Amino acid sequence: MTKVKNKAADRQHAKRESQLDFPFPKAVSRIGPVIQARAAEVAARLKVAYPIPDDGTREQFLNFTNPYECVTAVALSAQTTDENVNKVLPTLFERWPDCATLITADQKELEKVVHSLGFYRQKARNLLGMARVVVDDYDGEIPGNMVDLLRLPGVARKTANIVLTESFGITQGIAIDTHVYRISTRLGLTRAKNPAAAEGDLCKAFDYTDWYHINHNMVAFGREICDARKPLCGKCILADICPSAGTAKD
Ligand code: SF4
């Protein structure tokens, strides 16, 4: 029975991939019409709460102005806050404004600049590795497609999704960061065990037209209302459709 259902889910997934014309992760939880309807309602309410301004520029949480800065900023944001990352970016981008200059950096020097962000050795190593691959294989320009982005050291789907959406205007997935994972779990949209595993669930739960908005709007909502430690369920616009309302834990 399970096998038949899995086969049906696989067929559905393959059909959607062929309609959208790009591959994306499969769901790992059971995502049926009830969850899809809840997801649609969540997306609609968040769009009203966090509208895109008339000039089309929405609030940016990390400070970057081009694909190189975007990859760097997002890669550095693992396990720390955007505020902390924004503090080190001006120094980093002034000294190494692109991949061509970054490959000349001394690892120890780079470690000093990113030291306050934690995991600084790994982060510095990944940035140097990323810059080296970009210079050697992509003429120094960050590639604008998922397959090539995932070849860069330190770049997984979360970073690649953000870079594609924010720097190239391409949406081929949903970036699952700590806010998106926490809120989606509380809302019962995924039962995945970790953020990376949840992307397929959210891609199935949300209509493709909502994928672009989900990361940005859930991050804004997570900062303002659905906080990790103290969610403000009493003020929440999703409380009536949230299975965790009043009982949410970190
Ligand atoms: S009701 Fe509470 S747990 Fe649910 S989404 Fe709102 S703030 Fe988060």
Image (cartoon, grey):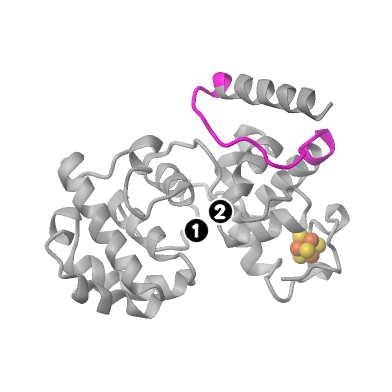
Q: Magenta segment, principal secondary structure?
A: loop
Residue 171, can we see it? yes
Closer to the camera in the image, 113 or 30: 30
Q: Earlier along the polypeptide chain: callout 2 or callout 1? A: 1
Residue 207: x, y in percent? 66, 34
Residue range in magenta is 18-36
Residue bearing mark 1: 59
- Residue 236 visible to the viewer: no
Judged from the image, the secondary structure of the residue bearing numbered disc 2 is helix
Q: Residues within 10 Å of mark 1 (few under 14, many from 20)?
A: few
- Tell me, yes or no, whether the two marked residues, 2 and 1, touch with CB atoms within 8 Å: yes
What's the mark number on residue 31? none
Residue placed under numbered mark 2 in the picture: 216
240 relative position to 73: left or right: right
Q: Residue at x 41, y 76 (%)?
A: 118
* Three-letter code, disc 1: Glu
